[in-house]
Amino acid sequence: MLSGGVGAARLLRALCDVIDPAQVVAVVNVGDDLVLNGLTICPDLDTITYTLARMNNDDLGWGLRDETWRVMDELAALGGEAWFRLGDRDLATHLYRSQRLNDGATKTEVTAELTQRLGVGVRLLPVTNDQVATEFVTDQGRLTFQEYFVRHHHDVVVSSVEIVGAEEARLSDEARRALEDADRLVIAPSNPLISIDPILRVPGVREILLERREHVVAVSPIIQGAALKGPADRLLRELGHEVSTLGVVDFYEGLVGTWIIDEADAALAEAIRARGVRVEVTTTIMADRANAERLAKVVLS
Ligand code: GDP
Ligand code: CA
């Protein structure tokens, strides 16, 4: 599964309820990754890891449950960088990762260690071990990913998104093999412009999907012209795409053999089929566990 954060994490969790997690591999976006207070933080990898370990914080939508904030409070009192909140338990992940990277381990190796220790059966593969940074050109100037998302709550006008470093990044051997060998490739219901595009821009990924299109299934993250959460709908509009599932279908043109769209968008099925792809219509909102399982079965069917 080509994976961003929350949308992907939910579908991966649902798949694990239906098939053996050892059969599932996620190739994960690293464009949100950042270094802050000397620590390397990988938000999408962490969201997926915590969700699959069933340790995620559903109220916040990020981080760990039963979290405390003593370090952040102290850091704020010192006048440090405390706008990007990292809980006390969450910090252990970033300390572990940063130390191992400093020792010379790759992001792929560190991710394998963390997921194994947290009992995650799905294999999580950062798309690349190289640095990729998604940045936003906005009416407030050029912003890093977390400045846009956290500091400005994605409430600024975006004129372009740049995935810095993607074109020079090397697709990891593990991710390449997973994409080439999988029986089925799934594009998660993640933000197309800032979660999936940074994966597609790493040389090799788009080519593999184009070639394996008949095996590619995509789940739309847009339902009735809106994102369930986050700026996907607003970004589609600001960057000149149609704000509907059709806009996402056209964005992934040539890469997808089968689309799974929400029943609320059933009226779009014919227009999507006219583009030469298969369409399945089902409930795609995974807030409800039974719905999530139904969606997972459609993805596998
Ligand atoms: P982030 O990295 O955590 O911001 O998350 P993603 O990029 O993975 O996901 C954000 C997108 O996921 C949004 O456009 C949401 O509409 C979509 N999304 C989240 N949950 C669901 C769901 O249950 N069903 C569907 N179809 N889309 C979802
Ligand atoms: Ca993300």
Image (cartoon, rainbow, N blue to C red):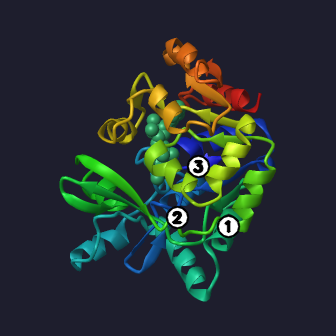
Query: What residue is disc 3 on?
Result: 3
- What element does badge 3 sit on? strand
Question: Looking at the image, is mark 3 or mark 2 nearer the viewer?
Answer: 2
Task: Look at label 1 and name its amino acid.
Answer: Ser
- What element does badge 1 sit on? loop
Would residue 176 appear left or right of 92 to someone viewing this image?
right
Quadrant where the image shows the C terminus: top right
Tell me if mark 1 has few (under 14), some (14-19) or many (20+) residues whose alpha carbon lies within 10 angstroms of its own: some
Would residue 79 appear left or right of 278 to someone viewing this image?
left
Q: Is residue 121 visible?
A: no
**Figure quadrant of residue 93:** bottom right
Task: Say whether mark 3 is within 8 Å of ligand 1.
Answer: yes
Image disc number at residue 167: 2
Q: Residue 18's spot in the image, x, y percent?
A: 76, 35
User: Would you place residue 234 above or below residue 182 in this image?
Assistant: above
User: Would you place residue 107 above or below residue 104 in this image?
Assistant: above
Task: Look at label 2 and name its amino acid.
Answer: Glu
Would residue 84 appear left or right of 67 to someone viewing this image?
left
Q: Earlier in the sequence, mark 3 or mark 2?
A: 3
In whole angstroms, how far apart are the C-alphas of marks 1 and 3? 15 Å
In whole angstroms, how far apart are the C-alphas of marks 2 and 1? 13 Å
Task: Look at label 3 and name its amino acid.
Answer: Ser
Q: Earlier in the sequence, mark 1 or mark 3?
A: 3
Image disc number at residue 172: 1
Residues 120 and 45: in front is 45
